[in-house]
């Protein structure tokens, strides 16, 4: 074991959550907030002398209140420099868990320990005073985060430039658009050099250009060894930033592990619901090694033309792939979708391939070729099998991620920028 890894193992966890639960009380009427606790207190008084009265008082109290268990027995530990992504359907408890870890909500049960300075990108801008200027709010928020005024003086120009709100920085926040306020709040949080960064759906701030800048800034923060806790529906961002992932369902942890494994189970659960809503057998959906399949519908074999699952090739070289598909009975409009993705999961391109139907089910074989006119890098091939009478009626039946991959070894930045080349015509005028 190296000296650096040994010293890291000796450090306490940056985030430690033990047996955390959160229960919300729901009151039948506003007055129930007063009389329900009185009924419970009366039940305790009559417990020994009049047990029957105590039971009736408790039953009456229950009619005025019910509880919602948002989280149950949550356990997690995150070491300094580690990154964890949390996913789940709406209502699964993701945001509640982040608010408890950030100290915004108290847990009903269990304990939470967070070590170091925390930047929480939760409800951005919620702590701003609308009657104060943007500049004044920056100083106040930084002070709450533990920054001295002289430190904020050194950062204020960087924060203003990052937020891109110009002269509005000296106007009251109530005059800001929602996008301006979100950008300023985000800029404050990402400039405080946090030890722990907590992100809840905060990467969708501003326009596409600002989102790209926000992603780059978070990458820079993580490169310094900051601990990341991320919640969001952007699975590509989770793949890019997180080394581990956790799936929540109805307030409980149902899966934890590598991001791709957890994402596959999450997508599989979503697809079961979609199939059931379309009148199909959602229970027939099952996990396979590299994704999920529906009954007999799945990718049986995927190989390069040389029999391998990975190839290195030159820019523009032809890549040929062979696929064997299993199709279940009753698929009226089978279609194979072949997608090319980069290592962060961003889809570069893809192709929908219509297949002749097999009413009784069976196998189909086909070959797909492409010219690797891509920038230097490693790319993954994802396949999906769908029943698609039309684009609006497409039903996903099988998904297979990362079975095949290839690497373009030529550095083509001298010829073009970005991931692939677009045809361009250049006309240059004569010099004067």
Image (spheres, rainbow, N blue to C red):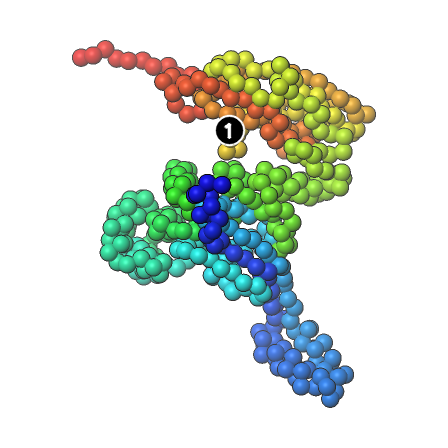
| Horizontal side of residue 182 vs 29, given as left or right | left
Identified at 70% across, 21% down, the residue is: 324
Provide the residue designation for mark 1: 342
Which of the two residues, 215 or 126, is positioned nearer the viewer here?
Answer: 215
Disc 1 secondary structure class: strand
Q: Which quadrant of the figure has residue 357?
A: top right
- The image shows residue 55 at horizontal and vertical percentages of 74, 79
| Horizontal side of residue 101 vs 41, given as left or right | left
Q: Which quadrant of the figure has residue 43?
A: bottom right
- The image shows residue 380 at horizontal and vertical percentages of 55, 27
Instruction: Answer above or below: position of 241 versus 199.
Output: above
Q: Residue furthest right?
A: 360
Instruction: Answer above or below: position of 346 versus 250.
Output: above
Q: Residue furthest left?
A: 432
| Horizontal side of residue 169 vs 115, given as left or right | left
Total numbered labels: 1
The answer, for residue 299, to whether it is visible in the render is yes
């Amino acid at each position: 074991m190296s000296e650096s890894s040994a010293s890291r193992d000796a450090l306490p966890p940056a985030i430690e959550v033990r047996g955390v639960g959160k229960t919300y009380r729901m009151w039948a009427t506003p007055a129930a907030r007063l009389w329900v606790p009185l009924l419970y207190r009366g039940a305790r008084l009559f417990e020994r002398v009049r047990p029957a009265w105590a039971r009736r008082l408790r039953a009456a109290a229950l009619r005025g209140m019910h509880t919602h268990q948002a989280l149950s027995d949550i356990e997690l530990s995150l070491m300094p420099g580690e990154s964890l992504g949390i996913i789940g359907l709406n209502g699964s408890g993701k945001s509640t868990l982040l608010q408890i870890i950030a100290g915004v909500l108290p847990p009903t049960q269990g304990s939470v320990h967070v070590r170091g300075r925390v930047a929480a990108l939760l409800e951005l801008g919620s702590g701003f005073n609308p009657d104060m200027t943007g500049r004044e709010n920056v100083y106040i928020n930084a002070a709450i985060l533990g920054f001295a005024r002289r430190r904020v003086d050194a950062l204020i120009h960087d924060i203003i430039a990052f937020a891109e709100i110009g002269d509005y920085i000296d106007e009251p926040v109530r005059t800001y658009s929602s996008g301006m306020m979100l950008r300023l709040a985000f800029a404050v949080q990402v400039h405080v050099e946090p030890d722990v960064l907590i992100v809840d759906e905060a990467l969708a701030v501003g326009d596409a250009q600002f989102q790209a800048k926000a992603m780059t800034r978070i990458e820079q923060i993580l490169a310094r060894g900051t601990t990341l806790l991320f919640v969001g529906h952007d699975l590509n961002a989770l793949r890019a930033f997180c080394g581990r992932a956790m799936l929540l369902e109805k307030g409980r942890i149902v899966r934890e592990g590598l991001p791709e494994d957890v994402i596959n189970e999450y997508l599989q659960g979503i697809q079961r619901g979609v199939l059931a809503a379309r009148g199909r057998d959602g229970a027939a959906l099952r996990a396979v090694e590299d994704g999920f399949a529906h009954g007999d519908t799945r990718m049986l074999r995927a190989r390069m033309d040389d029999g391998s699952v990975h190839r290195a090739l030159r820019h523009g070289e032809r890549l040929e792939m062979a696929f064997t598909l299993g199709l279940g009975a009753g698929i009226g409009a089978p279609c194979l979708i072949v997608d090319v993705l980069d290592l962060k999961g961003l889809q570069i391109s893809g192709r929908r391939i219509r297949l002749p139907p097999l009413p009784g089910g069976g196998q189909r074989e086909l070959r797909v070729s492409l010219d690797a006119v891509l920038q230097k890098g490693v790319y993954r091939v994802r396949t999906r099998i769908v029943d698609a009478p039309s684009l609006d009626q497409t039903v996903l039946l099988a998904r297979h991620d990362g079975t095949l991959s290839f690497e373009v070894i030529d550095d083509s930045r001298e010829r073009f920028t970005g991931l692939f080349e677009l045809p361009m015509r250049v006309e240059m005028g004569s010099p004067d």
